[in-house]
Image (cartoon, rainbow, N blue to C red):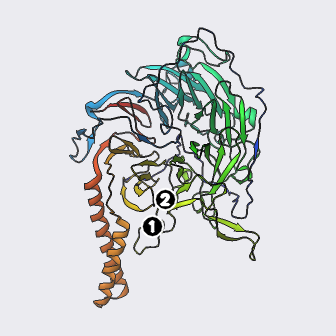
Amino acid sequence: MNRTYGLAALAVAGVGLAVGGMAWFGKDTALPTENVAQAEEPKKSPAAPPEPANRAAPPAGGKGDHAMFGGTNGRNFVNLVATGFSAEFEKSEESPKLSVLGKRVKWKEPLGSRAYGGPTVAGGKVFVGTNNENPRNKRDRGKATDDNPEGPPVDKGILMCFDEASGKFQWQAVHDKLPGGQVVDWPNEGICSTPVVEGNRVYYASNQCQIVCADVAGFANGNDGIQTEKYKDKADVDMIWVMDMIGELKVFPHNMTASSPLIVGDLILVVTANGVDENHINIPYPEAPSFLALNKNTGKVAWKSNLPGKAIMHGQWSNCAVGTVKGQTLAVFPGGDGWLYALDTQTGKLVWKFDANPKDSKYELGGKGTRSDFIGTPVILDDKVFIGTGQDPEHFEGVGHFWCIDATKQGDVSPEVVDDAGKKAGAVKENSNSAVIWHYGGDEKRPFAKRDYAFGRTMSTACIIDGLVYISELAGYLHCLDAKTGKKFWQYDTKSAIWGSAYYVDGKIVLANEDGDMLIFKHEKEQTVMDEVADGSAAGVAAEKKAVADGKDSAAAGKVGRDANDDSIKATKEKVAAKYLLTKIEVGEPIRSTPIIANGVMYILTEKSLIAVSAK
């Protein structure tokens, strides 16, 4: 069982040492209702020149491509295209209860020592973010030493492109580290952004706090766009344009820039990563944008918003989601203050905001607090938003909240508001304009429960299919909930930290963890309640009550209750596993991303490899 959380990050996670204090902006902090500024055109970032008339036509996107984080702009990890994916794998020689990828591995390519960005599969190519611990170019090594005659790898951020069919390496984007050190560009994390592909363009956020538009073909069709790339070997990236968010917009990325861009028409939407400094108290540039829209053809700013401004608690490493609600296209941005902000995609105007934490919650650096922001990405589906709260994994486990929110409202749609006009200034009251449809998580008060909260902090994005929500949490649990009511059906403990998300394909739910296990569950539209916490609590209470009636003292009766609770939990776990768990595959390398299927092939991004797995 492994629930350790190392100094690492991923495409949707930020990392920071738990040092120093943190100023908390709590229930009495006034949040701006709108803080959107039309931006001037960039003056320093390289802009794209006009494309040549003989420019090659964009590659045709396959119906089964996975072209962005979440697969669609709504970010729901559901694949309704792929069929024929088998849960049958070769049995492990070590244990008949375990499986291995075995002969189903189509190809496997080495990456750096950490990889979180991707995979993105589109137009016959696969894109992943990693670091430079396994250099593809001798240029990217240091001076030779006695211990390393080839020269040690130089720390850089890397985006790699592979051929989808064969796994053959095509080209890479190489980005130097920021000079500001680990507070803005954490060592050895590489590129943590999951790219988005549209036609012959791939867009991603670099470790240098840039948004980059590149040619999917690399330099194979010549040097298009800007001509000022630092690295121009045959296998280097062909950049079309670059937006430097530090130089142009004064963004201060805390630890890393990890946003996975999203395309809406001619706009690229991103979360900038603006955050606190190394002391974890001061926000160097609260006026810098947190949410940003760029023209996808030029990289010029369309609009920007510095919500949440001075209320940022740590960093901002999540992603936005987009959906059409009552005829209006909304972009839902997770803020570093623990609020969700729904903005009009074309103007950046605020439509609604939602505080995802109780008003009496408090943020404390290091994970002891009860107020969180977001690592997971919101999902927009059927005029609703689904999202869970979480923190930097260095803050470990803690209380979390998972929400289903009505996206059709306007204004402050939080569950509670501060009653500044009432008799008790600053008192909290229910919000008559609340958009809460249901809430899962918060305090767990049932007797004999193993922890004091029902749902923990999550780095995961929801998977919603057939009226069910599958959401995992950092502590390693997968929860199955009713999408209409939030009622819990069951949970499963994978016994290792989960950084990725549950993924639906062909009647199955796929989930991977930090131990390198990939689990495949059976999805059923009709669910049976098998709640181990409820069952265990009821059994414990009944057993304790009987023990007291039989004359046992309180200590002895309590032990009887705890034993009965444990036995009941074990029995319910076995029922859940027997009904839903199809197979557990030992991949053998830590997985801090979400396995996906594109064009009939599964792609698993481990910490150091990209693995293509056949459907059968």
> How would you rate the neighbour count of disc 1 (Cα within 10 Å): few for under 14, some for 14-19, many for 20 or more?
some
Residue 48: % across, % down: 68, 20
Q: Residue at x 26, y 30 (%)?
A: 103
Q: Residue at x 50, y 24 (%)?
A: 135
Q: Residue at x 58, y 29 (%)?
A: 203
Dot 1: element: loop
> How would you rate the neighbour count of disc 2 (Cα within 10 Å): few for under 14, some for 14-19, many for 20 or more?
many
Q: Which residue is mark 2?
A: 456
Q: Which residue is mark 1?
A: 451
On screen, residue 169 above or below 38: above
Q: Quadrant of the C terminus?
A: top left
Residue 117: % across, % down: 51, 35
Disc on res. 442: none
Q: Mark yes or no: residue 337 visible.
A: no
> What amino acid does circle 1 point to?
Arg
Dot 2: element: loop
On screen, residue 180 above or below 389: above
Q: Are marks 1 and 2 in contact (CB under 8 Å)?
A: yes
